[in-house]
Amino acid sequence: MKKLTLMILKSLARLMLARRKPRVVGVTGSVGKTGTKEAIACVLSAKFRVRKSEKSYNNEFGVPLTILGIESGGSNIFKWAAQLAKLPVNFLRSGYPEVLVLEMGVDKPKDMDYLLRIVRPDIAVFTSVGEIPAHVENFLSRSELLKEKAKLALGVPRSGFVVYDNDSPDWQEFFNGKVRAGRISYGLMNDVDVKVHRPEIRFAEGEAVTPVPLGIAFKIEHKGSTVPFRIDGVFSDAGAYLAGAACAVGVIFGMNLIEISSAFLSYVPPRGRMNLLEGIKGSYILDDTYNSSPASLRLALDTLQSLPAKRKIAVLGDMLELGEFSEPAHRDAGRHMAKACDIVFAVGLRMQFAKDELVAHGFKENENIFYFEDSEAAGLKLKETVREGDLVLVKGSQGMRMEKVVKEIMAIPEKASELLARQSKQWLKT
């Protein structure tokens, strides 16, 4: 049934693209894909009809579903029938998007090959990858994983563009001499086409126990023009990078920096990606529960360290699918926690390696380092521990269900369905 469904979706998606001929932006990488996809869609929506990948629609199911404008039927054949019944109208109705912004993920070998048989983007966007990318355990090596992602660039026609994070050194190696399309680089550190200046955190005015961060402010430079940018709800360099990528795509579509900067005023970060939420007892939460990898965890810990708080607490679940890199990655994370945190709640078998490193750095068990097998137990203990002025980072791989911790300590749990990741009926049952 799965193979039949995939075959139908692939064929119909290709028919839809042939009929409607939208311009397509494909986004891949290992860190910040979803935020970058959202930023690009936000910018282009200021001038064009845009459809973006929703939820986790970035695989062999999600990409054709986005193209067709329908939802997944899950394991229910009747729901699939209901969704497929919408297609005749979708094929004929006016107002199909002028631009599709597709997140194109890679979990295993040949994933990108499959997606490129459905759609070949006009613009390919590459975010950073980190030293140990997510899903690396499914590949023979890190290089093989990056090679699979880099196939996206090879699928772009000569008339298109490849946009890439030049501060992530890997992409140049895979692109040189192989890419037919034009190339536009962005970044903070190196000589790039779209230069992003280091962001500064903006704080709300008032007399709170600790200053409340609002977002970041920075400047972007392109071809002699420099324009200020502001993004609310984002607190790290990650926001600057996604802005650089979106800016590069906006320029390709004929937008100027002022138009792009104005578009960012309506940018809303995706759920579970470093969202700042009010917590119980006058605390605040950095909700980064959507997923975790070594690079994104380090960025989250750096952000926690940079923000003011009476106490900095990290509640961190296992990073999954790292294979042979799992133990060293979790130990390295433990060393970073020791610098950034006052209290750590370690959740999952792999986080025991991080706990061992914390103990070696002077943390004391059941005093400022606590260990739990699952997120529910961690949430209950955290509820007792948190107090006014605390800033709590919560993060872990999807399978760790760390959003349950956030729900336990958020000030208004009734808003969980609006604010947290994985709140569908299917996820809530697990």
Image (cartoon, helix red, strand yellow):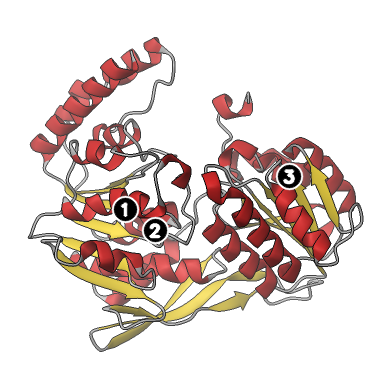
Q: Earlier in the sequence, mark 3 or mark 1?
A: 1
Image point (29%, 79%), residue name: 192
Split into 4 quadrants, where in the image is the N terminus? Answer: top left
Nearest the viewer among 330 and 304 is: 330
**Neighbour tally class for label 2: few under 14, some 14-19, many 20 plus, Cα within 10 Å:** many
Name the residue tied to disc 3: 347
Name the element at disc 3: strand
Left or right of 320, for residue 56 = left
* Residue 265 place in picture, x, y as percent: 43, 66
* Residue 104 place in picture, x, y as percent: 32, 45
Residue sticking out furthest to the top: 78
**Neighbour tally class for label 3: few under 14, some 14-19, many 20 plus, Cα within 10 Å:** many
Q: Earlier in the sequence, mark 1 or mark 2?
A: 1
Name the element at disc 1: strand
Name the residue tied to disc 1: 27
Image point (89%, 59%), residue name: 364
Q: Amino acid at mark 3?
A: Val
Q: Amino acid at mark 1?
A: Val
Q: Quadrant of residue 29?
A: bottom left
Left or right of 172, for residue 324 = right
Residue sticking out furthest to the bottom: 224
Task: Tell me, for residue 36, which label it has, or none.
Answer: 2
Nearest the viewer among 96 and 164 is: 164
* Residue 297 place in picture, x, y as percent: 59, 58
Q: Earlier in the sequence, mark 2 or mark 3?
A: 2
Q: Amino acid at mark 2?
A: Thr
Real-space Cα separation, disc 3 to disc 1, in angstroms: 31 Å
Name the element at disc 2: helix
**Neighbour tally class for label 1: few under 14, some 14-19, many 20 plus, Cα within 10 Å:** many
